[in-house]
Amino acid sequence: MTTFLYEFQDMIRVGQLLTERNQVAGTDGNISVRSGPDQILMTPTGRELGDLDETDLLRLDLEGNVIEGHGRPSSETAMHLRIYARRPEIRAVVHAHPIFATAFASAGKELAWDVLPETALFVGPIPLTDYAAPGTDEVPQVVDRYLANNNALLLRNHGLVALGHSLKEAYRRLDMIEHTAQILFYSHQLGDPQKIPKYDLERLIRLRKEMENQNSD
């Protein structure tokens, strides 16, 4: 596994950040990284993300079969594999249950992406999916219809999944969305959050698409 040590260390660090920032609890959440054209690195089921080491992480083929490592991959592996199949430019996926974002998901409330400029620029739309039973084949089927043009999905009654051209970008998006959800939660108590003016939202969308095209090259 030494070939993948750098990726493993990044995954371990993200697992620690998710735990330190209360974005997971217990054995919640899962992380994956695309490793070459036909493999991914995946966190195992039943392990706390804040307490991982290199021996815990698994290397899988794109059918979900374990090539290297011990234990069973996360119960949400099928969701990760569906994302990689539909979005070949994506290299990392982070799924967690951050408190404020998951509160929106549990209440069946859309998370407005067009209130904070940073969210519009670095994330874009965050659709709320239909409900799917966690750990089942329903999850990849439900997320599939939202994947084409979105970098993050709010899973109804479940949590948040963020995609990135790198693990750093995927985690940064998840963290930014949770920060956005917290701001929106308090904004709703003060009144209706005000959307970014249309002219500037269009500018931010253009900039985001330019950045994404550069990352895909």
Image (cartoon, rainbow, N blue to C red):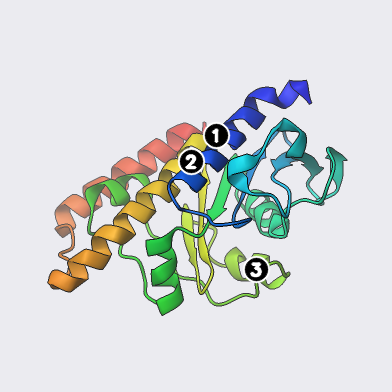
Vertical order, 66 against 124 (above or below): above
Front-most of 51 and 150? 51
Cα–Cα gap, marks 1 and 2:
6 Å
Q: Is residue 150 visible to us here? A: no
Q: Is residue 215 left or right of residue 80?
A: left
Residue at left offset 72%, top offset 55%: 46
Residue 195: x, y in percent?
18, 62
Proximity of marks 1 and 2: CB atoms separated by less than 8 Å = yes
Q: Horizontal and vertical percent for residue 121?
A: 30, 46
Q: Which residue occupies 61% across, 64% down?
A: 144
Q: Earlier in the sequence, mark 1 or mark 3?
A: 1
- Of residue 2 and residue 151, the one placed in the foreground of this image is 2
Q: Residues within 10 Å of mark 3 (few under 14, many from 20)?
A: many
> Taking 13 as reference, is 170 above or below it?
below
Kindly identify the amino acid type of the residue bearing the numbered disc 1.
Arg
Please name the residue that numbered disc 2 is placed on. Answer: 17
Tell me the number on the disc at residue 185.
none
For badge 2, the amino acid type reads Leu
Left or right: where does residue 1 sit relative to residue 153? right
Disc 3 or disc 2, which is closer to the eye? Answer: 2
Q: Around disc 1, counting alpha carbons within 10 Å, would you say few (fewer than 14), some (14 to 19), or many (20 or more)?
A: some
Q: Residue 139 carries which label?
A: 3
Residue drawn at x 64%, y 24% as measured from the top left: 6
Residue density around tag 2, few if under 14, some if 14–19, many if 20 or more, within 10 Å: some
